[in-house]
Image (cartoon, rainbow, N blue to C red):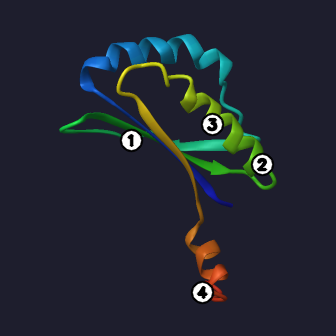
Amino acid sequence: MPYIVGTMRYPSHKQLDIAKRWIKISSKYPDDDTMAVQLCAPVTTDENGIIVMGIYDVKEGQLKKAFTFLSSMFYEYIDIEGYEYTVRIWSTFEEALAIAGIQAPE
C-alpha cells in the first residue's frame, strides 16, 4: 500500500499559533486506523523555520479517502502567515519496482 507524506513548514515565531490551531482542530481529525496509520511525525528546523512531516501507511482501498482527509487537515493552517504545506502520495519500493515491470525478491 502507498504512503501519504504531509509536510508543513512555518516560521519559528509562528510555532505557538500552529500549536494552538492543532489543539483547536485535533478533535475534527481523529486517528482512523481503518483508513491510514500514522507511522511517525518527524520534526526539524532550518534557516526558514520549522518543518513537520506526517508519514501515513494507507490501508487497502482507502487512498482517495485518506488523501482528501489529510489534505483537509493540512489546509486548516493556511491562514497562518508563512505557513506552507504539501501532501504527496509515495509508492512503496515494491510498488515502484512493479511499475518498471520488476518483481521484488522475497
The disc, 2 or 4, on the residue closer to the chain's N-terminal end is: 2
Residue sitting at x 73%, y 51%: 63
Residue 101 sits above or below residue 88 on the image: below
Q: Secondary structure at mark 4?
A: loop
Closest to the observer, 15 or 58: 15
The disc, 4 or 3, on the residue closer to the chain's N-terminal end is: 3
Residue on which the image places disc 4: 105
Residue sitting at x 42%, y 19%: 80
Q: Position of residue 16 (x, y in %)?
A: 34, 13
The disc, 1 or 2, on the residue closer to the chain's N-terminal end is: 1
Residue on which the image places disc 3: 70
Residue 42 sits above or below residue 17 on the image: below
Residue on which the image places disc 2: 62
For badge 3, the amino acid type reads: Leu
Local crowd size for mark 3, using a 10 Å CA cut-off: few (<14), some (14–19), many (≥20): some
| Tag of residue 42 | 1
Local crowd size for mark 1, using a 10 Å CA cut-off: few (<14), some (14–19), many (≥20): few
Mark in the foreground, 4 or 3: 3
Residue sitting at x 65%, y 87%: 103
Between the C-alphas of marks 4 and 3, the distance is 32 Å
Between the C-alphas of marks 2 and 3, the distance is 12 Å
